[in-house]
Image (cartoon, coloured by chain):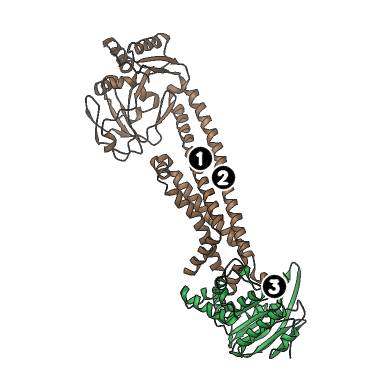
Amino acid sequence: MIIKVQNIKKEYISGRSKNLVLKGVSFEVNRGEKVAIVGPSGSGKTTLLNIIGLLIQPTEGEVYLEGKNVSSLSVKERARLRNKFFGYIFQEFLLVEEDTVFQNIEIPLLYSPHRTTKRKRKEMVREVLEKVGLEVKIKEKVKNLSGGERQRVAIARAIINDPEVILADEPTGSLDVENAEKVMNILEDLVAKGKTLLIVTHNELIAKRCDRIFKISDGHVTIT
Amino acid sequence: MPVLIKLVLKDIRKNKWKIAIFVFQMLVFLFLLMLALAQFPMISQGIKAINIIKISNLIRQQEIMSFKDYMNIWSEIYIDKDMYYFFEDLFDKGDNAYSVMESAEPIGFSDRFPDVDGVVFAVGKFDEVFGFDKYKPEPKETYVFVGADVKTIDVGDQIELGMYNKQTYTVDARLKKGETYLNKTHYRSLDNKVLVLTSFRNTTTLYQYVSLRELIPNIHLINPDIQQIDQVIQMANRTKKFALVPWEVSLRDVIKATFQESFLWVMLFACFVVSMCIFMICGFISSIYMLIDHNFVEYAVHQIYGATPQMLYLRIILFVIFIVLLPAAIFYNVPDINDFMKVSPELKWVWWFMAIFLLIMVVLVSVLAILRLSKKDLTEFLRRDR
């Protein structure tokens, strides 16, 4: 078991109104597993993914990574864990448009506890770009890339630090069928190499390609 | 830290034209600020002058007359016995005249005492008019005082004065800070000067006709009668060097008017300086806000992949420091500007004022930038329904 969430609750407060999005979610994910998180819009899929990825704090409940409770870690420790344990992929890519492909992908390396020279970073970036089929675009500015290429750059950035878990939030949501297939193939290759994948999706076909499906409805998770 | 510096350099590269424009604006601003601040000592001069009016009964209660002087540059000064005795009586025996010789430093004096800005010989009732009686230790013919800011000469030191004849004098006292006198309508600070109170006879013995070139046109008479004014004008005319015209301007009124004018100028410059400072700070803040808004995706990505909020704050602070330090470093390294601010003790504070202003600017802009960034919540940013 690589991830365990226990009784997670998350409440958003907007002015006077409170919205309890997650009402005590608990589940476990095993190493090398491919899990889809599905549910209607606003059901809390992204929120759950961000809580697992230590990007936001739950209102209540605990998250365990490799058996260790990480809910009460300091800001610095959480940042360190985000850097080495997770790779994040977002529907809107979250790339720095004016920067080059290299500058975007090297970001996780800059905060890695293992110092690397620029030469080494270039080597590593080239390696991951080969994996996603974009090695010729290393000096290209992100703003000049197509949607599919951008998402592959985002995947390259997510895996450059060799994380244990890939968190993908609608990774194919902004892509056409062909590019979506390419992205899914890359992600499945990573799982085949032992990585764990949690993927938020609306797409039933993608969900069906996963080992398990967590369906969120009314703040609760049903596992199928 | 090396990562942060690398990222700050990237921010600088990305914003190089904006920074170049800002640096240019900042340099112009610092230059204008320096010029504006340099006007402020005028007010202190004015206050000193008002103090003279307060402390001096003679100026407060009586009119002092000076003369406009016209000099014949083609003629050497002529003086005979009668003329000499007239001026000697006027200053050394009379009780209503004074004069000053303002360029009395001997050759090589400024090399030995670089912080002395001149030696002033004063004759007649000068000491009574400007209240220098209090410094006199015992009755004697000549007293030597040093200004408050003179460091190379101390009380008890001996200095040699004179041009054609030389005489060594012991320094009797140190003047208090802010001592001033008036020559016609000009204030003269004594803080960096050596003041010699002596007789007309002694001054002319030491400097001969050179001293007459200054003592005659600088004659001041206190409540003179018409006959005395006529005599002074006649004697001055006989030198073939000078023509004096009575200048019936009340020194008291001149001081007040000049003080008011100075005050007005200072107020004007103060408004200018304050509005310039506000303008620069507001401009800088809005530029930084735009940078933060523009870079927010980048900040979010860095935070997702391992940067703490503190690292982002530090990155912005380093960027702000660089932007302010660059024009400041250029400005403070222009030799003429540096000399301008350091050459006069009255302007040294301008250097410090500007340095403190820049520091305040860095702190203020950094704090506001951090507040701006901290309000942009990563949690909110990551919600797709935002």
Give the amino acid type for the residue marked by disc 2 in the picture. Met
Q: Do discs 3 and 2 belong to a common subunit?
A: yes
Query: How far is disc 2 from disc 1 in space, using C-alphas?
Result: 10 Å
According to the image, label 3 marks what residue?
B383
> Which quadrant of the rendered structure holds the C terminus of chain B?
bottom right
Image mark 2: chain:
B
Residue at x 57% of width, y 49% of height:
B280
Q: Do discs 2 and 1 belong to a common subunit?
A: yes
Q: Tell me whether the residue at label 1 lies in contact with that at label 3, contact meaning CB atoms closer than 8 angstroms.
A: no
* Residue that extends furthest to the front in the rendered view of this protein: A136
Q: Tell me whether the residue at label 2 lies in contact with that at label 1, contact meaning CB atoms closer than 8 angstroms.
A: yes
Q: Is residue A170 left or right of residue B167?
A: right
Query: Which one is nearer the viewer's eye here, A205 or B340?
Result: A205
According to the image, label 1 marks what residue?
B36
Q: Residues within 10 Å of mark 2 (few under 14, many from 20)?
A: some
Q: Tell me whether the residue at label 3 lies in contact with that at label 2, contact meaning CB atoms closer than 8 angstroms.
A: no
What chain is the brown one? B
| First of labels 3, 2 by sequence position | 2
B180 over B271 or under it: above or below: above
Query: Which one is nearer the viewer's eye here, A197 or B375?
Result: A197
Task: Tell me the quarter of the picture where residue A129 sits.
Answer: bottom right
The reply to whether residue A8 is in sight is: no
Task: Tell me the quarter of the picture where residue A8 sits.
Answer: bottom right
- Say which mark, if any, is on residue B206: none
According to the image, label 2 marks what residue?
B276
- Residue B379's spot in the image, x, y percent? 66, 71
| First of labels 1, 3 by sequence position | 1
Image mark 1: chain:
B
Q: Is residue A145 left or right of residue B354?
A: right
Rendering colour (chain A) = green
- Residue B223's spot in the image, x, y percent? 43, 15
